[in-house]
Amino acid sequence: MSRLFDTREGDDGLPGPERRLAVLALILGTLMAVVDTTMINIALPSIAASLEVPASRAVWVTNLFQISCAAFLLVFAALSQLLSRRRIYVAGVGVFTLASLGAALSTSLESLLLFRALQGLGAAAMLSIGPSIYRQVFPSRLLGSALGLSALVVAGGYAAGPAIGGVLLSVADWPWLFALHLPLGAVALVLAWRALPREARREGGFDWAGALLSIAMLCGFFLAMDGVGHGMPAWQVAAWLGVSLAAATLFLGRQRRAPHPLMPLDIFREPRFSLALVAQGTAFVGQGLAFVALSFLFQQEMGFTPLQTAWLFTPWPLAIMLVGPRAGRLADRLNPSLLSSAGLGLLLLGLALLARLGAEASVVDVLWRMLLCGVGFGLFQPPNNRELMGTVPRERSANASGVMSTSRTVGQSFGVALVGAFLATGLPIQATLWLGAFFTLLALGASLARVPMAGAAQRHAREAAAREAAAARE
């Protein structure tokens, strides 16, 4: 960990001491947004009972947060170029913290939903540009290690959310789940304002038409996916998908001719970026499928309780926390595409083995397979993120960060929705896990396709560094 904060002559990024404060601000903001996602889920029955609403309406406490967050990821990534990443991140922390206070004080579902939507906006502002700020803060030679740290924080937040929520609900009411964010948000706000690097604003306007089309595209998609998972009539799902597809068509046309596009299409000309994005999206479809399908498998087929199921999931994020930072460090020295491909191979094997579990399988049978999946995903994600962020010009890193966050969110939500569709057909839950393995296989194909390109890029970088060192000695 100490090597993340050492400095060398010629390093870009922030000096070591300032880097520590900036990283702490990023960690606190990310943790608040990620922990909230999983922590609030277990409080939905308590919220429904306290506010005297049906469970079907209480689900929107989670849904509205996710839709609001996902719909604005691209928007805030583009705005950060116009206003600066530091201002957008600070505003995101501030909005999230104030909305948490409002949610804690809410006495009706309507007011709670309003503040949950605002929390989603704050989370979008933080998550959309977090990876690009890591690229600002750290020197290029440590980018993989930095993104490994980011993977550790995200995995740790997802893993800790249910446990934190369960402990708090055992001693206090649900509003305290939101109040927990207040001290963390205050500290993150001060640190972000003080430590995040300042940068010049971009000259020019903002693509408001593209922003509206982007929001319509993503909202339509997430409402359709939510409808699939909750038994919405097929015509309504089709209508929302139609809205999403129409907005997507108009959005892409707008991006080709806008003077300051929300999502510059030239970033996709780099094949390593495009392939890494495909690998990420399909891998998160596989993980989203697996997480929901395994909950049904463990409880309905194998007879485990919800609490036991939560413990059975622990090896997956725990392995990501342990492997992710090490994979990030390796990606700074070895071929990142090769590391990502190896990780996807392990994830594919783990999912296939989980799909073969029978109702009589033991806890040990489950745990080592979950551990294998976590090791695979931990080995895949930081090197893949390094490819996503390292293959675009620095001036496009905010856009790349927004696209990366959107791809991850869309992939995971699509995976969750597919589980609902498969359950409606009456197919065995193991079939859903095989579908998750299929999407992981697609990710592996995209990752393997860029291995030669990444190897060639590394060789060129080493040769350039050797030439510069020779010139300096002369």
Image: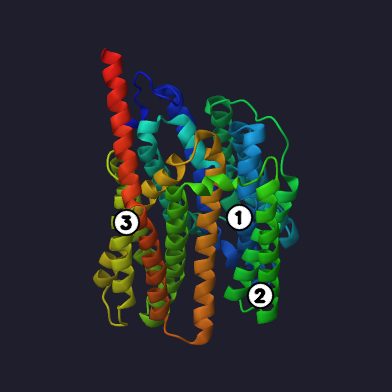
Label 2 sits on residue: 237
Q: Which of marks 3 and 1 is nearer the N terminus?
A: 1
Quarter occupied by the C terminus:
top left
Label 1 sits on residue: 70
Q: Which amino acid does label 3 sit on?
A: Ser
Residue depicted at 52% across the width and 56% down the height: 407
How far apart marks 3 and 2 lie (CA) works out to 35 Å
Q: What residue type is labelled 2?
A: Val
How far apart marks 2 and 1 lie (CA) works out to 18 Å
Left or right, 282 with respect to 37, comes to left
Label 3 sits on residue: 341
Q: Position of residue 463 (x, y in %)?
A: 29, 31
Callout 3 touching callout 1 (CB < 8 Å):
no
Q: Position of residue 391 (x, y in %)?
A: 44, 42
Residue depicted at 71% across the width and 33% down the height: 204
How far apart marks 3 and 1 lie (CA) works out to 27 Å
Left or right, 341 with respect to 55, comes to left
Residue depicted at 65% across the width and 28% down the height: 201
**Mark 3: which secondary structure?**
helix
Mark 1, other Cα within 10 Å: few <14 / some 14–19 / many ≥20? many
Image: 225 above or below 3 = below
Q: Which of marks 2 and 1 is nearer the N terminus?
A: 1
Mark 2, other Cα within 10 Å: few <14 / some 14–19 / many ≥20? some
Image: 183 above or below 169 = above
Quarter occupied by the N terminus:
top left
- Residue 434 is drawn in which quadrant? bottom left
Q: What residue type is labelled 1?
A: Ala
Residue 324 seen in this snapshot: no
